[in-house]
Image: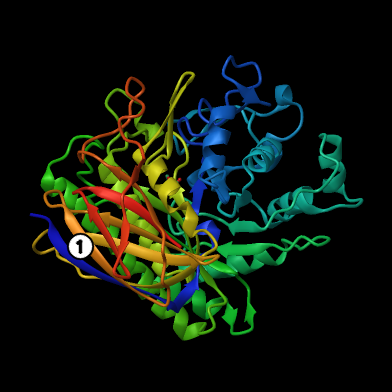
Amino acid sequence: MAKQIKMLINTDDKQGHINREIYGNFSEHLGRCIYNGIYVGEDSDILNIHGLRKDIIDALKNIKLPVLRWPGGCFADEYHWKDGIGDKNDRKKIINTNWGGVVEDNSFGTHEFMELCELVGCEPYIAGNVGSGTVRELSEWVEYMTFDGVSPMADLRKKNGHEKAWKLKYLGIGNENWGCGGHMTPEYYADQYKQFANFCKNYNDNKLYKIACGPNAADYNWTEVMMKKLGRPGEWFADGLSLHFYTVPDWNNKGYATEFDRDGYYDVLSAAGYIDELITRHSEIMNRYDPDGSVALIVDEWGTWYDVEKGTNPGFLFQQNTMRDAMVAAISLNSFNRHCKRVKMANIAQAVNVLQAVILTEGEMMIKTPTYHVFDLFKDHQDGDAVYCYSQNENMKEGRNTPMISSSASVKDGVLTLTVANCGLDDDVDIVCELSGIAPSKASARILTGDVHDHNTFDDPEKVFISDYNARIDDGKLKIKLPACSVAEVRLS
Ligand code: AHR
């Protein structure tokens, strides 16, 4: 017998605007994310545009990827951008000390990244080097990218073949400066931030949106110090404060992506749900200093982190991706939607071949992971208004907060989008959803479901895929049956 679940959506009760950037990705010079992933080089037999894989560009366009963060991660605070411009034969070969000690030949640099973003149609989000860089270096990078006119850096860009300045909105000032970005105290970093940010100028009509390094998960003191030191209402030095949170129940025992039991499933889901508490508590601190919400919370690294696949380089962080990861993605994205008043951007780690990747590649083959499909199911929320969405619920594991139902709803152009997951492993649920503020006549739905261990492989690339599904309006209510371990998108108009 299916469980009966009551829901209520009130479209008159608007909860905030869902910035499309909540559906962002992160790409780092790590393992096979950039090299042998996104970037295969112009001489590759794999179909490419100036070395950028065409199938990856198309796949990212399909999920309407709004923003891509680059070049790290920990790599960002070791990256010297001038190594990655000009003739590729002359570019420096350096050691990627964070990720496997491999040779970084700098063949993918600023021009290649900007072209990638143009082809995908997304905003670039550059993470600048604070840990081992200088104020001048970052200031010159901004000048190189965004100044149209006569100046040393604009001239250099032109000499390197790009006459017109690019538009750059999102600029991160360092990455994890409490850790790999320099092991700084929040007090020291806040001063560093102000100095670096001060010299990153707005040229012509380019307006930077500056993001300060924020807390590691539950480091509430970091947030407190940042908010204290980064300004006051009406006069903020930062537009955003980042938050990094990885879904890992036990860092000493991460386990494999595809090998887990019921406890392993529910523990990971409960860890994913913790993002809600983190956002709530960091927001409470931010609200005290910034009641108007001028400074956004930017969750620019999130996702699952398991042991690497057997036989792969431990420094490359390559992992498979199952329906468990799809559920983590649904829980996280629903949470970001619900907190969209404060959360203005989020970037899953990472886009390709690293951690909770949306895309995996092997040679010329490419697969879309279950997580990719969740981004596809959720894409209609982009630029919508979040609306009140309540669900009756049930806890799936004693002693842990592991709700059976995860949901969020938004309205855009008169269409209501609901994304809802049945996180339970045993029971179907019959959802009856009361609707207030909207009286739709049409319902359509898409679903992702399967055994919790199901995943796509290069031999079986479409084991997990999205199907059209049944939802109906009956007596003014939305009715839908969700199988165990499923994520659905419902559209009502
Ligand atoms: O995403 C992998 C790494 O995780 C990033 O480089 C770093 O910022 C974080 O610790």
Residue 195 in the image: above or below residue 166? below
Residue at 60% of width from left, 70% of height from top?
Answer: 238
Q: Amino acid at mark 1?
A: Pro
**Can you give x and y, in whole percent of width and height, for residue 391 in the image?**
25, 69
Q: Residue furthest right?
A: 150
Q: Quadrant of residue 11?
A: bottom left
Q: Is the residue at mark 1 in contact range of ligand 1, meaning its CB lies under 8 Å from it?
A: no
Q: Which image quarter holds the N terminus?
A: bottom left
Residue 235 in the image: above or below residue 47? below
Circle 1: element type? loop
Residue 31 in the image: above or below residue 228? above
Marker count (numbered):
1
Left or right placement of residue 64 versus residue 325 in this view? right
Most foreground residue, 469 or 358: 469
Residue 144 visible, this angle: yes
Residue at 35% of width from left, 29% of height from top?
Answer: 462
Residue at 68% of width from left, 42% of height from top?
Answer: 118
Mark 1 sits on what residue?
403
Q: Quadrant of residue 439?
A: bottom left
Most foreground residue, 417 or 212: 417
Q: How is the image coloured?
A: rainbow
Q: Quadrant of residue 310?
A: top left
**Can you give x and y, in whole percent of width and height, for residue 180 in the image?**
45, 50
Left or right placement of residue 205 versus residue 274 in this view? right
**Can you give x and y, in whole percent of width and height, for residue 272 in the image?**
29, 56
Residue 249 visible, this angle: no
Most foreground residue, 203 or 381: 381
Residue 199 in the image: above or below residue 350? below
Residue at 61% of width from left, 27% of height from top?
Answer: 105
**Can you give x and y, in whole percent of width and height, for residue 428 in the image?**
16, 52
Label 1 CA crowd tier, 10 Å (few <14, some 14–19, many 20+): many
